[in-house]
Image: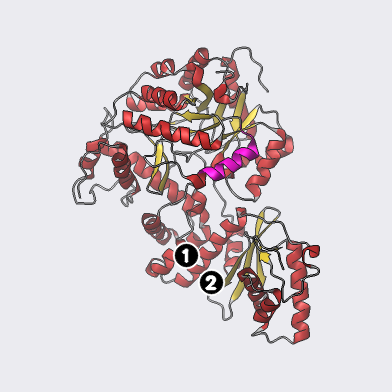
């Protein structure tokens, strides 16, 4: 529907936001046709003044371009691994589709990718034929964002739980710790990418240009025969990956779900092939390691008992 | 103004923006800098390296918060979740005043992450002033609003940009972060006299001044913050200082950021315009 000239603030902002958030043409100019098939230039003339150098369309186009270049630039920085998997052209197509559909619903660009996994699951054709690897990569790269700056609770101390029997003891995990079950060795791929010298290029400028660094070649990996269990976490303000044994992963997931420690251990060992004394020994070392990492906490708002 | 209720009666000199490429230099070399301006949104997180670095900076330096996403000019009211996070940071930094832009940037919870220009209407004056008052009352810290660079003007505008700024700050009873580079950029894009703008601003409300570099294109100028400050902008800065007196001044350099020393050296050029020079060098 062709909009009438806005007379109220709310109408002007709604109209301009619609124009600014419409995807650019392939040559990175503003679309010449409005949503109802009329000329975008006519729509722009209704609310934006021309000057002696730029017409209304061209002035609006500056904001349209800035919006897309800014969001695409931030998206590319947050998902460098995804870009390396898809290649530049398919990555750009996915990025535009995602941002057009989901946009940014947060005051911070940090959350720009928080709905990407769901979007790729709903639109798998945009990631084909690499959909499975893409979903793994998106999950790990979003986990990196969480691990980088999510809250840190007071780590659990041995004396906090010393006298509580396992059947009553409940624990929590650090909010910055993300547990993932993957089919592809994405942690190895990201390590390779880092070694190839893909560098971060953070910009705070309010004005941005279209030029995003391009890369040659794609990262690829075959699905593994067995699942990969990965913890994405933070140590000394840096993000790390740690592979976990299946039982350790299940144990941590059960702890996060809030069951008692005794029940969590039962869940973790349901499918184990290790002898009881072996798994008991492993659990002891896992807990010692997780305590040293500070992963374990009191559960939120309740006494561990 | 040198010291007023709009900057919590402080007397800050010349500062620079705290940027990631300079973290290591600042923490290791501890250079003498009068104050740092931080982008609030970069530190409105729950934990991790950004807050760790900020806490170290706060141990040694004075910090003022500058935001990019309050969007005082939105037709929508301010986002309370956002304000709660911002207030937590305000308590952490002890910022004497806080600034953000006289612009809009989101509609119905969908964010552009841009500083979009206001239509200069009486309705927008009332809406914007009400939003500023609500934010100030929630945050309990003096606010200063910054004039933005713009590339478009609206048919519905009923006054000039400086008249709009003046009406908003009077009704909101808040301070001004006068960005002289933005005035210059907009004056070239819209064809007005930047000195007229400077002369029209209520001097007693100017809490802080920004200077920055910009980029010239064939048909317009873009506020890119990726260059040294150009001579016409320094000239405007001199005129602003002559009007408002010695005022906290901040150089913004956000892209293609050179070394810390280069940025600081550029910022200190402002001292040539300040009366009674007493600037950290």
Which chain letter goes with mark 1?
A
Tell me which secondary structure the magenta stretch mostly adopts. Answer: helix
Helix, strand or loop at disc 2?
Answer: loop
Q: Residue at x 52, y 30 (%)?
A: B143
Mark 2 closeness class: few <14, some 14–19, many ≥20 residues within 10 Å: some
Q: CA distance from mark 2 to mark 1?
A: 19 Å
Q: Which residue is mark 1?
A: A117
The residue tagged 2 is: A221
Magenta stretch: residue B249 in it?
no
Q: Using residue B278 as the reference point, say whether residue B74 is left or right of it.
A: left
The tag earlier along the polypeptide, 2 or 1, is: 1
Q: Chain of mark 2?
A: A
Q: Which residues are magenta?
A: B83-95
Residue A267 in view here: yes
Q: Which mark is residue B269?
A: none
Residue at 50% from the left image edge and 63% from the top image edge: A138
Name the one closer to the observer, B159 or A261.
A261
The quadrant in which residue A116 appears is bottom left
Q: Position of residue B43 (x, y in %)?
A: 59, 44
User: Disc count in the image?
Assistant: 2
Residue B84 on the magenta segment: yes
In depth, the one of A105 and B86 nearer the eye is B86
Up the image or down, B30 lies above or below B193; here it is below
Considering the numbered disc 1 on the image, is that residue within a helix, a strand or a loop? helix
């Amino acid at each position: 529907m062709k909009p009438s000239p806005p007379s109220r603030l709310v109408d002007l902002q709604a109209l301009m936001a619609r124009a600014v958030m419409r995807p650019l043409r392939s040559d990175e100019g503003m679309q010449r046709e409005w949503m109802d098939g009329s000329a975008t230039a006519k729509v722009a003339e209704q609310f934006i003044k021309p000057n002696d150098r730029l017409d209304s369309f061209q002035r609006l186009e500056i904001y349209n371009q800035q919006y897309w270049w800014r969001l695409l630039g931030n998206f590319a920085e947050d998902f460098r691994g995804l870009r390396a998997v898809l290649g530049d052209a398919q990555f750009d197509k996915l990025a535009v589709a995602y941002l057009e559909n989901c946009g940014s619903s947060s005051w911070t660009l940090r959350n720009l990718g928080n709905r990407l996994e769901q979007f790729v699951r709903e639109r798998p054709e945009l990631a084909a034929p690499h959909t499975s690897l893409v979903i793994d990569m998106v999950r790990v790269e979003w986990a990196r964002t969480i691990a980088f700056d999510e809250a840190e609770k007071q780590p659990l101390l041995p004396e906090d739980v010393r006298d509580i029997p396992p059947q009553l003891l409940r624990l929590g995990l650090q909010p910055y710790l993300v547990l993932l079950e993957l089919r592809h060795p994405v942690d190895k791929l990201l390590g390779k990418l880092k070694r190839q010298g893909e560098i971060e290029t953070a910009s705070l400028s309010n004005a941005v240009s279209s030029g995003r660094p391009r890369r040659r070649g794609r990262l690829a990996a075959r699905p593994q025969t067995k699942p990969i269990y990965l913890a994405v976490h933070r140590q000394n303000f840096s993000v790390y990956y740690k592979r976990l044994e299946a039982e350790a992963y299940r144990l941590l997931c059960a702890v996060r779900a809030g069951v008692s420690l005794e029940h969590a251990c039962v869940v973790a060992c349901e499918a184990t092939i290790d002898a009881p004394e072996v798994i008991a020994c492993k659990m002891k070392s896992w807990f010692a390691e997780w305590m040293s990492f500070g992963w374990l906490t009191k559960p939120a708002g309740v006494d561990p008992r | 103004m040198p010291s007023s209720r709009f900057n919590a009666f402080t007397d800050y000199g010349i500062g620079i923006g705290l940027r990631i490429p300079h973290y290591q230099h600042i923490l290791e070399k501890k250079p003498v800098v009068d104050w740092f301006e931080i982008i609030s949104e970069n530190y409105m997180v729950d934990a991790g390296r950004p807050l760790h670095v900020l806490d170290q900076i706060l141990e040694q330096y004075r910090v003022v918060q500058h935001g990019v996403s309050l969007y005082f000019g939105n037709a929508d009211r301010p986002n309370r979740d956002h304000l709660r996070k911002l207030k937590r940071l305000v308590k952490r930094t002890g910022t004497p005043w806080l600034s953000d832009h006289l612009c809009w940037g989101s509609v119905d919870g969908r964010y552009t992450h841009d500083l979009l220009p206001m239509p200069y209407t009486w309705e927008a004056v009332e809406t914007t002033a009400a939003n500023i008052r609500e934010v100030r009352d929630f945050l309990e810290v003096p606010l200063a609003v910054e004039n933005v660079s713009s590339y478009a003007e609206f048919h519905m505008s009923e006054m000039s940009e400086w008249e709009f700024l003046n009406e908003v700050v009077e009704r909101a009873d808040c301070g001004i972060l006068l960005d002289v580079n933005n005035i210059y950029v907009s004056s070239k894009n819209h064809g007005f006299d930047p000195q007229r703008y400077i002369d029209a601003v209520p001097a007693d409300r100017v809490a802080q001044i920004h200077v920055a570099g910009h980029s010239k294109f064939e048909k317009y100028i873009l506020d890119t913050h990726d260059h040294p400050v150009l001579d016409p902008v320094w000239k405007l800065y001199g005129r602003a200082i002559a009007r408002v007196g010695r005022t906290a001044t901040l150089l913004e350099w956000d892209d293609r950021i050179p070394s810390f020393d280069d940025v600081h050296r550029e910022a200190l050029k402002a001292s040539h315009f300040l009366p009674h020079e007493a600037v950290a060098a």
